[in-house]
Image (cartoon, rainbow, N blue to C red):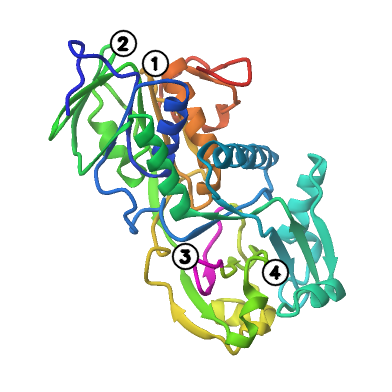
Amino acid sequence: MTASAHDGVLDLVVIGGGVMGLFTAYHASRAGARVAVLEAGRIGDPRTASYGRTRSYRRDYLDPRYVRLADEAIRLWNEFERDCGTRALVRCGCMNIAADAVTPELASTYGRRSTAVMRRLGLDPEVLDRRQISTRFGYLSADEAYLDDEAGLVDVAAVTEALLRVLAQRKVAVHEGVEVAAIVDDGDAVRVTTDVGDVTARGLVIAAGHGTNDVLSRLAGCELRIPLTRDRPSEAKYYVPRPAERSTFTADRMPVTAYLDTGIYVHPIVDGVTEAVKIGYYNPPDVPRGTTGIESIAAFVDQCMPGLRTAQVSDVRDVDQCDYDLVGDDEFVLGLVPGHRAVAVGVGWRGTGYKFAPWAGRVLHQLARQQGTVYDVAQFDPARFTDRVTDPVDVLQGDEVH
């Protein structure tokens, strides 16, 4: 693997072959760039946060900035499906629920507050009361629900397959098992030295997940280190309902269901993808979880999803049990590396990032190749973790950057 000034400098090198890195290569190659992807492990490693069976995509956030970006990400997911001729999204909707017996202060629940934010931005989830919930979703016990029909699940395997297929068609080299030894940025080009050769490009994107600081430490003159920690669901269970009840829990009838005040999310059965309802229990970084009486998945099922009480239960031990990369201030890290005009970094997706992948890849591509982006990403600036003062990132005008 060699690309030098003598045989043609690439436009972009991406370090990290997870979904963020692959989407960066996708957007760059779509704009005609010559791109290479370097992955330390293997694409599709189940131990990494980019892979699994399903991830939810939704717009219900308490921060209006994330709502806007999630809405833009859905637009880009739809564009990706059309461009690749694949089905990436399972459009089953996403529903936040609340029950007075669990969270008596219903006015302060995540579902009600996030719905208020969405409505201020012109998005209008459907509001359901207990009677409507019982009629439409008889397996649930809840007093109110907020259903966003534009949300749902991402078929992770379909996304990975489509990305790799399209990148191969565009002659993007994807190298696995590559260890980065050194990176030198001379201002005109970035030279990446690896255990299998050197590659030189006009821009570099670092999307290496938990390995991000290791890569940054190999970039000459880079002072940036990001306070990353690992997290994963406290519990993750598969529930297989009895055959006669299975159709009740399939994605054509059951939306993604969340009770984030208790740390619970539920994914429906997706034919051809997963044959069980998946329930996760975790501490969502943007919701200070209090004492609700629900301290396990079993307690949630007993109090809020009685329709699964008779289901067969097993632990999630396969590709859906992975580590997430968290940042100390619970914000994404997305921007140019201080002191390097054509080196961008993206990390800290904290378990919620997968849904933003087509947007994050677009931003990273624009930053590394154009030193600016059509989006306002000031809140995600990596410089917040250094003492350096960097120039503001340009917000480019127009709908597309080439």
Residue furthest bottom as drawn: 310
Q: Nearer the viewer, residue 298 or 102?
A: 298
Q: Earlier in the sequence, mark 1 or mark 3?
A: 3
Quadrant of the rendered image containing residue 301: bottom right
Q: Residue at x 64, y 77 (%)?
A: 247
- Dot 1 lies on which element? loop
What is the CA distance from the residue labelled 3 to the residue labelled 4? 26 Å
Q: Earlier in the sequence, mark 4 or mark 1?
A: 4
Mark drawn on residue 341 = 1
Q: Earlier in the sequence, mark 1 or mark 2?
A: 2
How many neighbours does mark 2 have within 10 angstroms: few (below 14), some (14-19), or many (20 or more)?
A: few
- Dot 4 lies on which element? loop
* Mark 3 or 4: the one toward you: 4
How many neighbours does mark 4 have within 10 angstroms: few (below 14), some (14-19), or many (20 or more)?
A: some
Q: Cβ–Cβ below 8 Å for labels 1 and 2?
A: yes
85 drawn magenta: no
277 drawn magenta: yes
- The residue beneath circle 2 is 187
Q: Residue at x 53, y 79 (%)?
A: 239
What is the CA distance from the residue labelled 4 to the residue labelled 1? 49 Å
Eyeballing the image, is 101 above or below 230? below
Eyeballing the image, is 84 above or below 375? below
What is the CA distance from the residue labelled 4 to the residue labelled 2? 55 Å
- The residue beneath circle 4 is 253
Quadrant of the rendered image containing residue 309: bottom right
Q: Kindly report the secondary structure that dominates the magenta region of the rendered protein.
A: loop
- Report the span colored magenta: 270-285
- The residue beneath circle 3 is 233
Under mark 1, the amino acid is: Arg
* Mark 4 or 1: the one toward you: 4
